[in-house]
């Protein structure tokens, strides 16, 4: 039936108090990302149709359904929050997908008590999912009874206007020139989407005659906006002014994603040597090994005749599986603080949730296709849009879509993702995807070469991060090279040598051998203490986040654990770990470290690291809010429990406790006192050493006073940079400037060391600066005696220490405090203590 486009009044599908969307206890709904709407806290146990219409989607688990009204408005009704986890239990569907229903008809019966007991909230949502076409005006205010008028839905006027539309819905707009390098491709688009989702207003981007909702990644990329293009952004809703401002900022901030990218060279196939393929270097390196050819999934012809419900369910399940896998990858990337990997897979997750993609696949299934074919077709249609834009960066993003095509197809086909990769193989493929690359790296591939792809692709970024030599754009000839043929991949020089002579092989081996030896030599010495040439000992410990990482650190020669981030135990779960579980986890880290000491930092969540089971108030500036030790103000029992668990590890003398985000001496004194009380309760004769993180300028300025009551200080240069320079440490556009070698930071470090020395306390550095070999002489010179680094770098940093003269470091590093910028400091370091 064609849409009649008439205004429509929705009746209340439930009885109960009415809530504004932004007060719903769910970030996604509350942000308006799913569309504009309203919520009801239900007092009855049956959801009714709010209007006449057709059911166009029913969640597999029966907790949500969408009705398309006769005017074309699509209304999603979602019973409770996180009710998907009940997996259908407690829900009885009273109408079928595809059925025509009348206003007031019962649709879903649900078990009110069960949802109240087992789920986050009973609050149920009524969302207008195509709010770009329709707008809504709430009618009911405080409480509604079933069937009473709830809200009015009307078609948006097609010509957007500059200012007020009416008293309740306002629209504003602005024109911006895009400064993102390469235009609005996946990562900037993801930034825009994330920004838009932070507001309840609906925002759109207009370019030429095309428009896209800011919450659709594909829609945004499909606009084909290039660097320097001028676009118009419109925002409509209560917080539209703020949304517009934020979007304008996000559109004009430059993501410096290609900072480390090698220069993109055009492949020079015309004058190639025989048996050499020319490509573009995506990640440098020189390796040789057997070629291993990888292929993608090819689907047979679709037989048709599928049950729509079944195929929709299969697709839902496959998508959920892949989302779970990507979330795992994201968590791991976060734990390893691998920002690039995190960004890439966050964009994948967003693509996987993109309404344009999901709607296209659903529509194809509804026309009788298999889920596999519908998914493939939806992806390929979007790839075609990106490729048709004729811009390389957009074309490369099509590869991210192909990645999702493969992953979801694998999940749909139940195909295990495994293959036997010969040791040291060089993998060739048409074009690999980011998730392929992670797998290959885990399976010890020696190098990668691709027929297509670009040096700015996500695969390239990941390959560089993993140190995996990678050539792209080699042309289809690379796919004809026989499986197993020995080749040399000289990625740095853009060459794939197909028939290397024995002499060439030997040469490559020799070069690699020299590099390896250097590393090995560092590794053999890694377990020895690191002393400067004039006899000053610098302890080189490791930052870890689990007992497995502690084991790796120990094997790599760590002198101890300088920072155990205990958040690993608390995140990604539904309930908090109890005392016993915590004790065992901390004990396992101690056990992994032989007789070395372990510094365990109390939980540093809050702020931007939220836990599901620890709802904290929404904060305007989370990094300036209740994070780290400040959380004890609101949840003292959590810290108490953690301290108890820590006090029960053995031997306790090897455990040191570190407090994050301390900003005044009283915080330290209070916790020290509580620790003493717990020691008495547990009948301990001695409390473990207690240290303070210096990661807030206030703490650095008060170091002397803190050192009077603390046993040691550990400088967190990541946060100290953020708070000193007033630059978000995760801000992509400022990444290059959040440099802890800034002279202001060096002054704070110097002051910390001087303050600690007055009380005979030692100072360590556990922020990322400790892992930067260029900074080693400066830190040693300023008086730092412990460096806590990432495990693979222990040998390298110890080697660096052994080549330093501490007295000379002291003298030269003081001069650096007067330099004009972090860049100047870096140049001076390179001059005084060159890195070979
Ligand atoms: C720091 O801020 O430098 C630090 C080590 O803590 P985190 O990175 O966990 O915030
Ligand atoms: Mg920190």
Image (tube, rainbow, N blue to C red):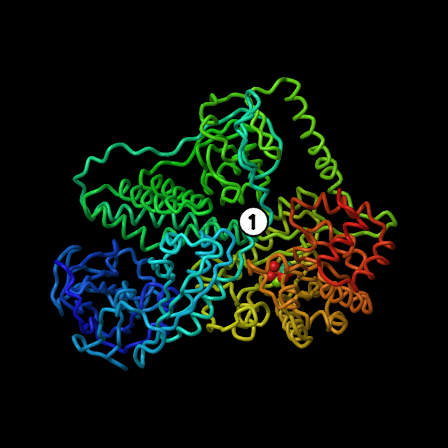
Tag 1's secondary structure? loop
Name the spot of residue 351 as percent of width and height, x first: 39, 52
Question: Within 8 Å of ligand 1, the CB of disc 1?
Answer: no
Residue farthest toward the top in the current orientation of the protein: 502
Q: Nearer the viewer, residue 622 or 365?
A: 365
Quadrant that contains the N terminus? bottom left
Asked if one can make out residue 25 in the rendered structure from this viewpoint, the answer is no
Label 1 Cα neighbours within 10 Å, binned few <14 / some 14-19 / many ≥20: few
Q: Nearer the viewer, residue 788 or 356?
A: 356
Quarter location, residue 372: top left
Name the spot of residue 559 as percent of width and height, x first: 72, 49
Residue in the picture at 20% in, 35% down: 303
* Disc 1 target residue: 258
Q: Nearer the viewer, residue 294 or 331?
A: 294
* 634 over 110 or under it: above or below: below
Q: Nearer the viewer, residue 51 or 439?
A: 51
* 791 over 15 or under it: above or below: above
Left or right position of 453 against 813:
left
Left or right position of 616 against 76:
right
Quarter location, residue 727: bottom right
Name the spot of residue 300 as percent of width and height, x first: 27, 32
Name the spot of residue 114 as percent of width and height, x first: 28, 65
């Amino acid at each position: 039936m064609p849409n009649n486009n008439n205004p429509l009044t929705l009746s209340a599908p439930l009885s109960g108090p009415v809530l504004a969307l932004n007060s719903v206890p769910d970030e996604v709904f509350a942000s308006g990302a799913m569309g504009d709407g309203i919520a009801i806290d239900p007092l009855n146990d049956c959801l009714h149709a709010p209007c006449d219409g057709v059911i166009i989607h029913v969640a597999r688990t029966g907790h949500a359904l969408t009705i398309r009204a006769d005017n074309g408005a699509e209304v999603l009704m979602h019973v409770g929050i996180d009710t998907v986890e009940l997996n259908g239990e407690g829900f009885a569907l009273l109408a079928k997908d595809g059925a025509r229903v009348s206003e007031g008809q019962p649709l879903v019966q649900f078990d009110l008590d069960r949802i109240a007991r087992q789920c986050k909230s009973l609050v149920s949502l009524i969302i207008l999912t195509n709010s770009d076409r329709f707008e809504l005006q709430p009618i009911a205010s405080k409480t509604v009874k079933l069937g009473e008028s709830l809200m009015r839905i009307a078609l948006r006027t097609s010509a957007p206007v500059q200012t007020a539309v009416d008293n309740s819905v306002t629209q504003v707009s602005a024109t911006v020139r895009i400064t993102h390098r390469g235009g609005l491709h996946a990562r900037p688009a993801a930034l825009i989407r994330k920004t838009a989702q932070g507001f309840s207003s609906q925002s759109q981007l207009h370019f030429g005659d095309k428009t896209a909702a800011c919450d659709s990644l594909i829609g945004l990329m499909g606009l084909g906006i290039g660097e320097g293009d001028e676009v118009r952004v419109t925002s409509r809703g209560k917080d539209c002014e703020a949304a517009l401002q934020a979007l304008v900022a996000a559109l004009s901030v430059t993501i410096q994603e290609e900072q480390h990218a090698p220069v993109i060279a055009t492949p020079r196939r015309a004058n190639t040597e025989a048996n050499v393929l020319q490509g573009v270097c995506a990640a440098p390196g020189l390796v040789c090994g057997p070629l291993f050819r990888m292929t993608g999934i090819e689907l047979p012809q679709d037989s048709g005749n599928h049950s729509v419900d079944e195929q929709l369910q299969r697709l839902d399940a496959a998508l959920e599986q892949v989302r779970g896998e990507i979330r795992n990858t994201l968590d791991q990337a976060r734990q390893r603080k691998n920002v690039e990997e995190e960004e890439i897979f966050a964009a994948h997750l967003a693509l996987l949730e993109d309404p344009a993609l999901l709607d296209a696949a659903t529509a194809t299934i509804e026309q009788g296709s298999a889920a596999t074919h519908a998914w493939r077709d939806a992806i390929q249609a979007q790839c075609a849009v990106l490729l048709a834009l004729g811009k390389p960066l957009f074309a490369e993003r099509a590869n991210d879509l192909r990645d999702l095509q493969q992953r979801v197809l694998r999940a749909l086909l139940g195909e295990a993702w495994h293959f036997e990769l010969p040791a040291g193989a060089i993998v060739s493929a048409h074009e690999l995807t980011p998730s392929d690359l992670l797998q290959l790296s885990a399976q010890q591939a020696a190098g990668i070469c691709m027929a297509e792809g670009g040096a700015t692709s996500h695969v390239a970024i990941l390959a560089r991060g993993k140190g995996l030599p990678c050539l792209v754009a080699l042309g289809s000839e690379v796919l004809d090279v026989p499986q197993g043929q020995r080749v040399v991949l000289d990625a740095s020089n853009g060459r794939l040598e197909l028939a290397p002579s024995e002499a060439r092989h030997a040469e490559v081996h020799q070069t690699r051998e020299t590099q390896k030896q250097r590393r090995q030599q560092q590794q053999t010495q890694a377990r020895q203490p690191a002393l400067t040439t004039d006899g000053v000992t610098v302890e080189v410990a490791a930052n870890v986040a689990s007992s497995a990482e502690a084991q790796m650190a120990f094997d790599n020669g760590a002198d101890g654990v300088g920072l155990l981030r205990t958040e690993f135990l608390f995140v990604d779960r539904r309930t908090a770990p109890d005392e016993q579980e915590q004790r065992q986890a901390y004990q396992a880290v101690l056990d992994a470290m032989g007789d070395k000491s372990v510094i365990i930092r109390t939980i540093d969540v809050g702020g931007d690291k939220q836990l599901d089971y620890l709802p904290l108030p929404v904060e305007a500036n989370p990094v300036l809010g209740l994070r780290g030790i400040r959380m004890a103000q609101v949840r003292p029992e959590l810290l108490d429990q953690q301290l108890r668990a820590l006090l029960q590890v053995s031997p306790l003398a090897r455990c040191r406790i570190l407090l994050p985000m301390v900003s005044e001496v009283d915080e330290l004194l209070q916790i020290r006192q509580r620790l003493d009380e717990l020691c008495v309760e547990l009948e301990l004769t001695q409390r473990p050493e207690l240290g303070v993180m210096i990661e807030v300028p206030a703490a650095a300025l008060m170091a002397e006073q803190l050192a009077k009551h603390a046993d040691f200080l550990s400088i967190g240069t990541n946060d100290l940079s953020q708070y000193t320079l007033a630059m978000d440490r995760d801000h992509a556009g400022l990444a290059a400037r959040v440099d802890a070698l800034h002279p202001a930071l060096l002054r704070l470090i110097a002051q910390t060391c001087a303050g600690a020395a007055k009380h005979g306390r030692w100072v360590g550095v556990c922020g990322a600066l400790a892992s930067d070999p260029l900074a080693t002489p400066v830190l040693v010179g300023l008086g730092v005696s412990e460096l806590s680094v990432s495990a693979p770098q222990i040998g390298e940093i110890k080697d660096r220490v052994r080549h330093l003269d501490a007295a000379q470091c002291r003298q030269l590093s003081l001069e650096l405090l007067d330099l004009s910028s972090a860049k100047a400091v870096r140049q001076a370091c390179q001059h005084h203590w060159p890195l070979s």
